[in-house]
Amino acid sequence: MSVEPFFGPPYLSSPKATVLLVWQMCNINFFSINTIAFFLLAFSGCSGGDFVPVSGSVTFEGKPVPKLRVVFSPMPVGDNHAVGPFSLGVTDAAGKFTLETRHGKPGAVAGAHTTSFQYTDIGEDAMGDLRDQMADAKEDGDKEGFEKARQNIAKMKAKLKGRPVLMQRYTAKITVPESGTSDLKIELSEMGGE
């Protein structure tokens, strides 16, 4: 009586077929493990760690600055460039703001941040765009377009009255303490524009 080796189901009728099937299974598992590991590593920095509460006020020459978007972007720590998500808040009429992450969670990642500021009701290039419209209308002989652009410039100047002119966004390096802060005071006149 002879005993034939058993290699599993009929489609694995030879040792070569068994080796090929095992190799394919290993490749699939290797691919799956690598894929899972990649996504875990890639998104672990995006979710950030623990967020600490951050609120405060923005002033210019001691006066509150309303309608200002305040953005805190975590700075890299060593080789870690994905420290956590950015956080932002908008100042109210009293210049006060409270930060939320881009995912809507309250607070910010503790540590050093690059902080930038922009008005929510005036685009960065709005005044330049209006001046371009006025120049184009003048060049084309469009008196109505010229007058409309001139009126819009006057409205823009009225909006800016009493507020600092942000020709370029002001930026600053601000460190968020491990315990957070509820009384962060930011004075724009102490910062230089970019």
Image: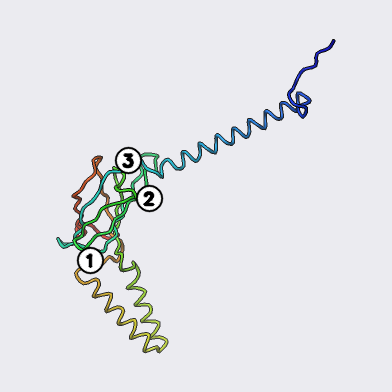
Label 1 sits on what residue type?
Answer: Pro
Q: Do the residues labelled 1 and 3 touch (CB within 8 Å)?
A: no
Identify the residue at horizontal 31%, vertical 54% (top origin): 88
Marked residue nearer the N-terminal end (2 or 3): 3
Q: Which residue is drawn at 40% across and 85% down?
A: 139
Task: Report which quarter residue 141 is drawn in.
Answer: bottom left
Alpha carbon distance from label 2 to label 1: 30 Å
With 159 as the anchor, is 141 left or right in this view? right
The C terminus lies in quadrant: bottom left
The label number, if any, that marks residue 164 in the structure image: 1
Q: In this view, does 151 lie above or below 44?
A: below
Q: In this view, does 33 lie above or below 115?
A: above
Residue 13's x, y, as percent?
Answer: 78, 26
The x, y position of residue 173, in whole percent, is: 27, 50
Per the rendering, the mark at residue 103 is 2
| Mark 2 vs 1: CB contact within 8 A | no
Mark 2 residue type: His
Q: Residue furthest top?
A: 1
Which comes sooner in the sequence, label 1 or label 3?
3
Kindly report which numbered mark, 2 or 1, lies closer to the viewer in this rendering: 2
Q: Name the residue under label 3.
A: 50
- Of badges 1 and 3, the one in the foreground is 3
